[in-house]
Amino acid sequence: MIRNSSDIDAIEARGLQAYLPAPSPFALLEDAARRRPDHCALCYLADIADPRRDTAITYAALVRHVRQAANLFRRLGVGPSDAVALLMPHVPSAQIALWGAEVAGRACPINPMLRPDHIVALLTARTRNSRWCWARTRTWTSGPRWYRRCARPEA
């Protein structure tokens, strides 16, 4: 707890790393997977009226899927200084893609509820070394409409 300036001085003297439980968020997930592999890490309520449609992902499965996503992004050329723009509804695969992008490079999640012109502005303002990831679902199919508006020649 930080109560005053002397607490801040103490943190700065030891370094922030001394107060963090792991060097990265993914390392926290890996630690949880080692300690509790079969515990639920992510529970997605697909239909509040029908619990049979819920999806539960264990820590072990989540870490495995995040590694697979990170490896895919790396094979696609994503490195530590690259950004992956993620335009996806809030579903389990979006969380996996988000964490995979963070492991491979940098994630840039974009709210799919934004107006198409805002999405286009965010995607065209991207850095040179970036990739796009969007999901087509039964209820969300807006990707192709904005994708053509974002294409630009590489410099």
Image (spheres, grey):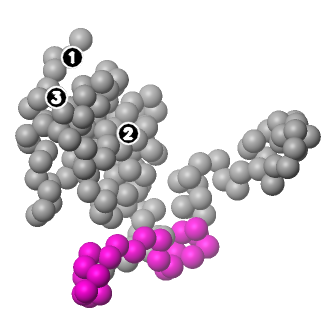
Q: Secondary structure at mark 3?
A: helix
**Residue identified by numbered label 2:** 108
Three-letter amino acid code at the position of disc 3: Cys
User: Which quadrant is home to the N terminus?
Assistant: bottom right
Residue that carries the numbered disc 3 in the rendered image: 150
Residue 107 visible from this viewpoint:
yes
Percent of width and height locating residue 11? 83, 42
In percent of width and height, residue 12 lies at 83, 36
Q: Position of residue 9 (x, y in %)?
A: 88, 37
Between discs 1 and 2, the one toward the N terminus: 2
The picture places residue 82, in percent across and down from the top left corner, at 39, 30
Query: Element type at marker 1?
Result: loop
Q: Is residue 1 above or below residue 138?
A: above
Q: Which mark is residue 154?
A: 1
Q: CA distance from mark 1 to mark 3?
A: 12 Å
CB atoms of marks 1 and 3 within 8 Å: no
Query: Magenta span covers which residues?
Result: 32-53
- On the image, which quarter does residue 101 sit in? top left
Q: Is residue 73 visible?
A: no
Q: Using the image, tell me which numbered label, if any, was put on residue 75.
A: none
Disc 2 on helix, strand or loop? strand
Quick one: quadrant of the C terminus? top left
Q: CA distance from mark 1 to mark 2?
A: 19 Å
Q: Left or right: 32 with respect to 62?
A: right
